[in-house]
Amino acid sequence: MLHIILITVAIIVVLFLVIVAMQPNEFCVTRSTGIVAPPERIFPHINDLRKWEAWSPWAKMDPACKYTFEGPPAGTGAISAWAGNKKAGEGRMTIIESRPSSLIRIKLEFLKPFKATNTAEFTFKPEGNQTLVMWSMSGKNNFFFKAFGLFVNCDKLIGGDFEKGLAALKAAVEAA
């Protein structure tokens, strides 16, 4: 009887490992919103990392989070690092590309609660009297994140935060 239990457990473990290994090697989460403003009014709210506290969904997770800034005040080379509670975690982001009113690309380095390096992008597309702002994050899925993704819908988890952030950005820009 013990052999049957051990063989069954081994089969379950092997099946789990195969299923995890078959998960995508990369991920991308994207959300967008229309903001009634031209791109040049929206762009500074994202391009200046010091302005993120006004609209970032993560700033509200830990009001006591500590932020530091390096490099230029905005644009390529601007850096923001944070250290907060378990929800906010710890990490840093660096603007690696900034094209006025069209694209901001950011290198995200998460240190806690887990280590990961991802890329975030904001694009701006004028459409009539508003601008479509698209926020995406992409990166590689290591074994841990592949397994985690079997139990947690990361698109909904991260996408929900993006939706909150875009709504707050929209409110801040349209109120100004």
Image: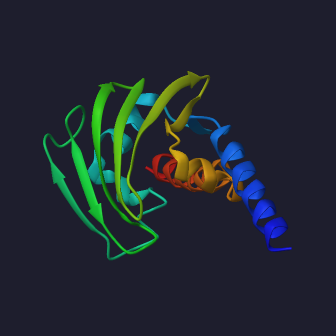
Q: Is residue 125 left or right of residue 101?
A: right
Horizontal and vertical percent for residue 52? 36, 53
Horizontally, is 172 left or right of 27 in the view? left
Residue at screen point 66% across, 49% down = 17
Q: Is residue 152 above or below residue 122?
A: below
The quadrant in which the N terminus is found is bottom right
The vertical placement of 74 against 144, above or below, is above
Is residue 144 in view from this perspective? yes
**Of residues 146 and 37, the one drawn nearer to the viewer in this rendering:** 146
Q: Work out whether residue 42 or residue 69 is closer to the camera in this orientation and state it.
A: 69
- Rendered view: 102 above or below 19: above
| Residue that protrudes farthest toward the left in the picture | 71
Q: Residue at x 81, y 69 (%)?
A: 5
Q: Residue at x 35, y 37 (%)?
A: 106
Please state the total of marks drawn on the protein image. Answer: 0
| Left or right of 172, for residue 72 | left
Residue 35 at least partly seen: no
Specify the quadrant of the image occupied by residue 41: top left
> At which x and y percent is residue 148?
61, 56
